[in-house]
Image (cartoon, grey):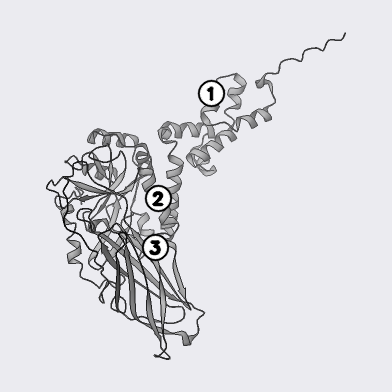
Amino acid sequence: MLTMAASPELRMDELPSDPLLHVLSYLGFRDLVRCSYVSRRLNDLSKHNPLWKSLCCKHWLLSDADRLQSGVSWYCLFRQYYGDLGRYIQYYPVLKRAWQQLKDFLQQRCPRMIASLKDGASEVELNDIEAQIGCRLPDDYRCSYRIHNGQKLVIPGLMGSMSLSNHYRSEVLLDVETAAGGFQQRKGMRRCLPLTFCFHTGLSQYMALEPAEGRRMFESFYPCPDQTAQDPSAIDMFITGSCFLEWFMTYVHNVVTGEYPIIRDQIFRYVHDKGCVATTGDITVSVSTSFLPELSSVHPPHFFFTYRIRIEMSSSASPEAACQLDSRYWKITTSDGNVEEVQGPGVVGEFPVMTPGKVHEYASCTTFSTPSEYMEGHYTFHRLANKEEVFQVAIPRFHMVCPPFREPVTRTQKASSSSYSARFDDHDDDNEYCDGDGDDFGDLRGINMAALEGAWCPRHI
């Protein structure tokens, strides 16, 4: 009987280099390091330059030019970056790419904003800030500030603008030193760090560094004082993000995808629903909306929205199609089911003439006592060649929804016996933001002025 000779045991590190390197190419950097301790051969192979080039590109977004400039191997370059930024490895590629996309976009559309960006803070500087305020900064925030330490205190602000008549807002992304100067310890805002600041309104978005007073850890929000409470520390919150990463990435996405329009070299935080477009004949109407927290309050319920309307006549329309807007009609429906109808001549005090290829844009506003509502309606036009030819152009339904809001734990519970009705502001002399004239918003600006009493202001402004 013949006996088969046992085949010699094949050790993995005795395999040819090519299949071994192929296997190693599937490993992450931690596993590659572990492999380097197995044997001398695997130690040599695990430092193969192409393996670490891939990892440098993946985690640090480095290019061949970066490697050549460094003068070291890909393996050594990875070690250098990991030694400096290793704690942020889960955030760095996402935030670095977002910052680069934002800067590429701004270079094309708002180049003067690029000059306002500050170089990244060092690890030591961020550690010093934590010691100064006595709170830990979240790693996603720290990572972003290692890339860019906010911006200089200039206008326009990186984090968006809004303009309506004599009301203007532009939010600067604060550098970490200025933010630390505005770190809140007062009751109602304890352990909150400002992220943004507006020179004109005193408005800031904050990040909660501890779960206190009804806030969740690291969420971002606009503070909104409860004007019906006896306790001045009762502050409601309009929530803008669950963490810094979500807050910043959502904003960047809206900017670089064109969701937020660029108007006069500024980012305006209007939101356009892709379905919010209606075409009647040769005329297309589209609408975008924005919520203004600085003119809103939860208690009493007063929610302020602005909307921007674009009316465009197709360039392929015949010259005989030229027409003029005569009047507007609105049907407004609030979330509690109330319906209001509004009619009036023109728009924002004007009666635009539409000719082939012409675009007319204007902005107006409305306030409601409910946190969401929708509007729809039509414009009435007449032909210039025949004033007797009157026709209507549909305005698509558009929704206005305020951000989620939360009441403070300490809010004094008070039953309200009064009901609040919506008020719609769409008058003949409404604001056209391009011209800067329109409604007198004096009464609206006073709605939330309590928020500005004792408002923090950056120390070195």
* CB under 8 Å between discs 2 and 1: no
Please say if 375 is above or below 55.
below
Q: Report the amino acid beneath label 2.
A: Thr
- Residue farthest along the top direction in this orientation: 1
Please say if 184 is above or below 325.
above
Q: Residue at x 77, y 12 (%)?
A: 6
Q: Could you tell me which secondary element the residue under label 2 belongs to?
A: helix
Quarter of the picture holding the N terminus: top right
* CB under 8 Å between discs 3 and 1: no
Q: Could you tell me which secondary element the residue under label 1 belongs to?
A: helix
Q: Report the amino acid beneath label 3.
A: Pro
Q: Which mark is residue 250?
A: 2
Whole-percent x, y for residue 181 in the image: 21, 43
Whole-percent x, y for residue 326 in the image: 34, 82
Q: Residue 87's quadrant in the figure?
A: top left
Q: Report the amino acid beneath label 1.
A: Arg
- Give the residue at mark 3: 261
Q: Residue at x 52, y 44 (%)?
A: 65
Residue 432 visible in rendering? no
In front here: 173 or 78? 173
